[in-house]
Structure formats: structure tokens, C-alpha cells
């Protein structure tokens, strides 16, 4: 279904995996066709997590299906500057580790942007890069991802449609998004090298891909708003053969997805009707039961009026549907076995601290399973502080003599390492373990606020996370087995899973996949339907009103306990290492504002007025 508001061809897929397969196979067909014609295929390639599944499929097609890349010429689209090509954050290294080293593109045909050029060499080298593209016959296909600033490659807001390969100043949003890869935004280079918008527009074909809810807002601006130099991706609509490939989440804010009744005829199912009535109530500023027929006609909902014999009756039906979704404490699980899966050691209290509080008071057998140790998010200064604290307490702890001297020698060695550590360098195993212990101790202190104890915490520390760096290993059988073993041990009636797949660091998404793998095996091996699944959302956003199956009210006192529990995560307080772009609030502020915002939205619809509320999707099959 195309929308007249969309100024680019847009293809929407149910998930990121099917999107990646489509693009990889499209590229494969192009390579085969041009090889059969005796021609090279010239590709412009991006980096980042978005195209990773495309690259994995291209590697599979080469290794298993015999796709020949010997006539392919590649050009990297961007690089940080300055940066050594061997650094783990280098785009040059990324493309070689994740694609080029696994296919048969001749080394001399793989062109990169060297981030270690001398300052006075950059301009000449950028001109030579443009010449190399022209000498190769121009770019046949450019694969792009879009940044939250709207950039393509490193063409930040303000770039011209005529720009060529050059050095640029990176936008603050881009640097914040990259902060997790550099262990803090202070370490992110302030400049980059990029192929220009003009170079991209000169290519024969352009495919822009985006996945996840975090990209939905900028995708809408790029696709639906007028061409704007503040969103350089909007220039793509000038190209005769460009297209946008999105998963359902990234497409979520397009008009045809968010309010489809404004652009086409829709089938007025109860779910679609509910969405439209909630939208109309918010748009006109009236509670649902105060809506009048004229409100529908004045806001282009004529067909909804005609779809039902009595519009007041359907408003009552939608109102009652929402009212029944409000679950008070006596309607929540009681004396049941519950596993709360927390991707990071603070997602439990940030995302569903109110629910956790109620589950504990309802005397459920709760296990909080912390899926990763979160060690990469601990500042080196915290390690130094805790080492100093222990040294000051040695005598009180009864550590004297050789044991005390051994500790002091170890402390000095660790401090020397931290002092001399370069940005992004992998910590020593001992430093990683100390950082893990800091996060674990904070997690226990957090759930103790809710009346739980150390015995309620499980630190399952999934293997995919254990790299000591931001880039993680693919989720695998070992990860799923650890989760399955816990489920077999606990035999839970309910499990709570992070459904916030917009986590900018990707950990929530990977943990979700691992739980999905384990739950499928759990159900299959037992031959019965497994536990009830509750999806919560994390620090990044909340379920929309029409999506949620359960709203659980939070009183002012309960919110105070939730915030106190979040405060126990001192290493993430005041200044978290990876707060994500666009939001300078601390995590406790985000949680408070998100929960009070949900309650206010319910109140505006005419539902009971609460101080705050958490939202969940339930009965979900992973």
C-alpha cells in the first residue's frame, strides 16, 4: 500500500531478518547479472548494526551458494577521523571483519577511507577517492543506513546535494549515538571522512535500510517531509532509482502505519477502530465518552461513522476495553513462580519497578535473571574508587600482613593499567570482573528496596556479552541453554521479557532472541503451552496506549520506591556511560516521566486518574 505522503518507494517487512534477506538477494542478483555481461559490480557499503544481517547473508551466499565476488569493487562510505584503521571502532576494520575478509573480493578492489591520514593529505586523498570511483565506472549500487540526525554516510545536517568525498564535522547526535562504541562520548572523534551526497546521487541505484523503532521518527521526516538539508536522506527522492527498506518497527511513524485512515480505506476491525478513537480523542482534546459524531466527520473519519450503527455505542465499547486493561494489585499474579529477565543489571527497576514491587508484595516466588553483567558501562573511576575503599578497610576486614601487601600490589597494577588505558581498549579480565561485581552489588541493592533478597537474583551472564567490548558475539545455542536450564529449574508461571527493541546498544534485542530460542524448546520439550509472557519496555520508550494489554497503576509512594531502587545503581547515576542520544535526562527521570505520562494519557481519555502507570503487552508468543 503506497501513500501519497511518501516521496520515495517504501518497502515494509515484518522483521529485520526478512528485510536483510531481500536486500542481500537483490545485491546477489545484480552481481550475477553484471558478471554474466562481463562487467564489474561497484558497491558503496555502510557500517553499523543495521546492515550486519545483509553481510551475513552475502557471506552465506558466497560460501554455500557459490556467489562469486571476484568482479566486485567496493568503496567504504564513511570513516571517523582521526582513527587508526586497526582500532575496533574503525569502519575500515568493521567492513573487513564483517564482510570483506569472508568473500573473494580481491584486496586491491576493496577501497577504504583511511582515518590515519595526515591533516595536509586529506583533501588530495579525497579527490583521489572520487577519481577511483569514476575510474571504476561509477557506483552501481549504494547501500545506506540512516543516522538519527538524518545523515547518510557522514553527510550531516547542512550537507549540500552537490557535496563530494570530504572531511566533515560530526553532528552531536551522531557522536552521542557512537558513544557506546568508544566507551563515552568524550572519546568519539569530532570529525569524519565521507563520500558526498552528490557522489551517492550519481550512483545507478540506492537502497536505504532502517530497522527498529528508534529510527521511525527520522524515517518519517526523510520520506514524508519536503526535501530539507537538515535531513540529508531526503535528497534521495531526487534519484530515479532509490528505495527505502524498513522493518515494521522503523515504519511505525509513517502516516500509512500510524494513522492509515488518513491516507487510504481501511477495514474497521475492533483494533483499528480502537486506534482511531484513541487518536481522535487525543486530537480533539475530549475524553472518549464525550466524542460526538461531528468530531469524526471533522477529522476525516466519515467511514468509521458509517461502519457502525451507533457511534456512541462503539465509543463505549472502546472505553470499556481500555478500562478492563487497568489491573490493580489484586488482579496481578499472586503466589506464582515468576522470572523477570533483565538484559542489563538495572532494566528490572527502571522498566517495571512498580510491577516488581507489587509482585513481591503479592508473595510471588520471583527470580530476577540478569542476562548480562553490564561491565562495559562502568567508568574506570568507579573501579579506582572501590579499590581505594577496600584498601581503607583492610584492617577492619582482618586482612593484614602478606594478604594486605598482595592486595596493595594488585591495586597498584590495576591503577597503572587504567591510567595508561587508551580509549576503547579492552579491560583486563580482573578489571572486567570488578566492574561486573559493581553492577551486581547495585542490582541486589535495587531489588532489596522491593523486599527481595540476594537469593532472588540470578546473574546468568550470557556468553554473547562476554567480549569486554561493545561489539558482542552472535547469540547462540549456549545462551539459549543457560536460559532453558533456568526455566526448567524454576518452571515459571509467568516470565517478564524486555520488549523494548529500540535499545540503541542492541542488547535488549539479542536477549529477546535468546529467550525466544529457549522458550520454543521449553514448550516443545514439555509438550504444553509454557508460561504467560509479559513484555515490558525499557529506558527508551513505553508501549502506546492502543498497544498495551495491561496498565498497572503506580501510587506516589510506589514511584518513590521505584526511584529509590534506581538510585541504588550508583554507577549509572548522574552520568551514565551510555545514556543514548536525544535525551539528557537520567534514567530515573525518564522512568518517572514515562510512567506519569502514561497515567496522564489514560486520564485524558476519561479513564481513572492515577499518579503513574506502567504498561505491558501480555499473552504474547515470542
Image (tube, helix red, strand yellow):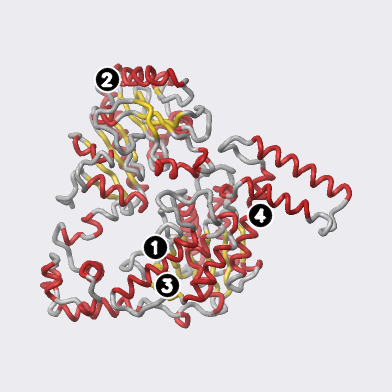
Residue 279 locus on image (x, y percent): 24, 67
x then y, percent, for residue 233:
27, 40
Q: CA distance from mark 3 to mark 4?
A: 33 Å
What's the distance in space between the residues labelled 3 and 1, CA to CA?
Answer: 13 Å
Circle on res. 56: none
For label 2, the residue is 137
Residue wearing tag 4: 437
Instruction: Identify the mark nearer the N-term, 3 or 1.
Output: 1
Residue depicted at 70% across the width and 37% down the height: 416
Sequence-first disc among 1 and 2: 2
Q: Secondary structure at mark 2?
A: loop
Q: Mark 3 or mark 1: which is in front?
A: 3
Circle nearer the N terminus (3, 4): 4
Q: Residue at x 35, y 48 (%)?
A: 211
Question: For the view shown, which residue lies furthest in the right direction?
Answer: 401
Give the side of residue 125 with respect to residue 33, left or right.
right
The answer to which image quadrant residue 70 occupies is: top left
Image location (x, y in percent) of residue 380? 63, 45
Marks 4 and 2 sit apart, C-alpha to C-alpha, by: 56 Å
The local secondary structure at tag 3 comes to strand
Name the front one of labels 4 and 2: 4
Residue under circle 3?
A: 612
Which of disc 1 and disc 4 is earlier in sequence? 4
In this rendered view, identify the residue nearer to me: 45 or 255.
255
**Residue labelled with disc 1:** 542
Q: Nearer the viewer, mark 3 or mark 4?
A: 3
Could you give the CA–CA distance between mark 4 and mark 1, rounded to whole angstroms? 30 Å
Disc 4 is placed on an element classified as: helix
Q: What's the distance in space between the residues labelled 1 and 2, CA to CA?
A: 48 Å
Amino acid at each position: 500500500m503506497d501513500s501519497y505522503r511518501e516521496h520515495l518507494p517504501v518497502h515494509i517487512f515484518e522483521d529485520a531478518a526478512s528485510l536483510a534477506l531481500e536486500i542481500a538477494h537483490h545485491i546477489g542478483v545484480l552481481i550475477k547479472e553484471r558478471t554474466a555481461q562481463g562487467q564489474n559490480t561497484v558497491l558503496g557499503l555502510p557500517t553499523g548494526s543495521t546492515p550486519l544481517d545483509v553481510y551475513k547473508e552475502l557471506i552465506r551466499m558466497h560460501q554455500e551458494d557459490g556467489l562469486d565476488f571476484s568482479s566486485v569493487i567496493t568503496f567504504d562510505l564513511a570513516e571517523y577521523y582521526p582513527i587508526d584503521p586497526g582500532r575496533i571502532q574503525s569502519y575500515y576494520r568493521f567492513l573487513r571483519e564483517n564482510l570483506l575478509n569472508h568473500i573473494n573480493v580481491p584486496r586491491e578492489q576493496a577501497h577504504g577511507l583511511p582515518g590515519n591520514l595526515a591533516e595536509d593529505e586529506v583533501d588530495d586523498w579525497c579527490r583521489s577517492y572520487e577519481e577511483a570511483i569514476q575510474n571504476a565506472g561509477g557506483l552501481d549500487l549504494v547501500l545506506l543506513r540512516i543516522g538519527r540526525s538524518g545523515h547518510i554516510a557522514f553527510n550531516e545536517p547542512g550537507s549540500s546535494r552537490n557535496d563530494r568525498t570530504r572531511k566533515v564535522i560530526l553532528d552531536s547526535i551522531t557522536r552521542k549515538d557512537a558513544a557506546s562504541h568508544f566507551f563515552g562520548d568524550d572519546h568519539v572523534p569530532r570529525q569524519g571522512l565521507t563520500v558526498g551526497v552528490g557522489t551517492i546521487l550519481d550512483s545507478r541505484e540506492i537502497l536505504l535500510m532502517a530497522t527498529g523503532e528508534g529510527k521511525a521518527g527520522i524515517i518519517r521526516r526523510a520520506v514524508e517531509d519536503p526535501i530539507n538539508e537538515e535531513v540529508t536522506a531526503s535528497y534521495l527522492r531526487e534519484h530515479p532509482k532509490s528505495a527505502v527498506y524498513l522493518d515494521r518497527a522503523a515504519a511505525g511513524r509513517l502516516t500509512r502505519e500510524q494513522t492509515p485512515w488518513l491516507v487510504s480505506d481501511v477495514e474497521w476491525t475492533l483494533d483499528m477502530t480502537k486506534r482511531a478513537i484513541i487518536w481522535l480523542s487525543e486530537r480533539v482534546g475530549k475524553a472518549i465518552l464525550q466524542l460526538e459524531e461531528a468530531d469524526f466527520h471533522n477529522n476525516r473519519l466519515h467511514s468509521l461513522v458509517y461502519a457502525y450503527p451507533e457511534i456512541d455505542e462503539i465509543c463505549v465499547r472502546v472505553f470499556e476495553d481500555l478500562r478492563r486493561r487497568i489491573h490493580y494489585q489484586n488482579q496481578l499474579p499472586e503466589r506464582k513462580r515468576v522470572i523477570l529477565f533483565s538484559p542489563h543489571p538495572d532494566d528490572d527497576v527502571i522498566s517495571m519497578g512498580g510491577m516488581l514491587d507489587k509482585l513481591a508484595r503479592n508473595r510471588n516466588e520471583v527470580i530476577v535473571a540478569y542476562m548480562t553483567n553490564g561491565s562495559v558501562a562502568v567508568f574506570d573511576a568507579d573501579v579506582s574508587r572501590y579499590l581505594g575503599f577496600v584498601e581503607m578497610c583492610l584492617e577492619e576486614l582482618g586482612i593484614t600482613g602478606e594478604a594486605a601487601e598482595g592486595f596493595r600490589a594488585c591495586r597498584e597494577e590495576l591503577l597503572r593499567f587504567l591510567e595508561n588505558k587508551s580509549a576503547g581498549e579492552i579491560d583486563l579480565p580482573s578489571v572486567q570482573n570488578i566492574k561486573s561485581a559493581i553492577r551486581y552489588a547495585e542490582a541486589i541493592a535495587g531489588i532489596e528496596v522491593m523486599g527481595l533478597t540476594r537469593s532472588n537474583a540470578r546473574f546468568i551472564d550470557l556468553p554473547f556479552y562476554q567480549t569486554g567490548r561493545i561489539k558482542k558475539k552472535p547469540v547462540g545455542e549456549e545462551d539459549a541453554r543457560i536460559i532453558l536450564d533456568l526455566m526448567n529449574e524454576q518452571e515459571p508461571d509467568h516470565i517478564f521479557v524486555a520488549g523494548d527493541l529500540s535499545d540503541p546498544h542492541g542488547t535488549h534485542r539479542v536477549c529477546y532472541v535468546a529467550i525466544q530460542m529457549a522458550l520454543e524448546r521449553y514448550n516443545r520439550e514439555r509438550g504444553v503451552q509454557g508460561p504467560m509472557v509479559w513484555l515490558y519496555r525499557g529506558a527508551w520508550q513505553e508501549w502506546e496506549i492502543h498497544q498495551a494489554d495491561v496498565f498497572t497503576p503506580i501510587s506516589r509512594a510506589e514511584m518513590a520506591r521505584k526511584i529509590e531502587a534506581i538510585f541504588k545503581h550508583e554507577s549509572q547515576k548522574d552520568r551514565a556511560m551510555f545514556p543514548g542520544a536525544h535525551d539528557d535526562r537520567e534514567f530515573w527521570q525518564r522512568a518517572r516521566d514515562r510512567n506519569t505520562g502514561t497515567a496522564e494519557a489514560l486520564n485524558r481519555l476519561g479513564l481513572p486518574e492515577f499518579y503513574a502507570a506502567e504498561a505491558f503487552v501480555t499473552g504474547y508468543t515470542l
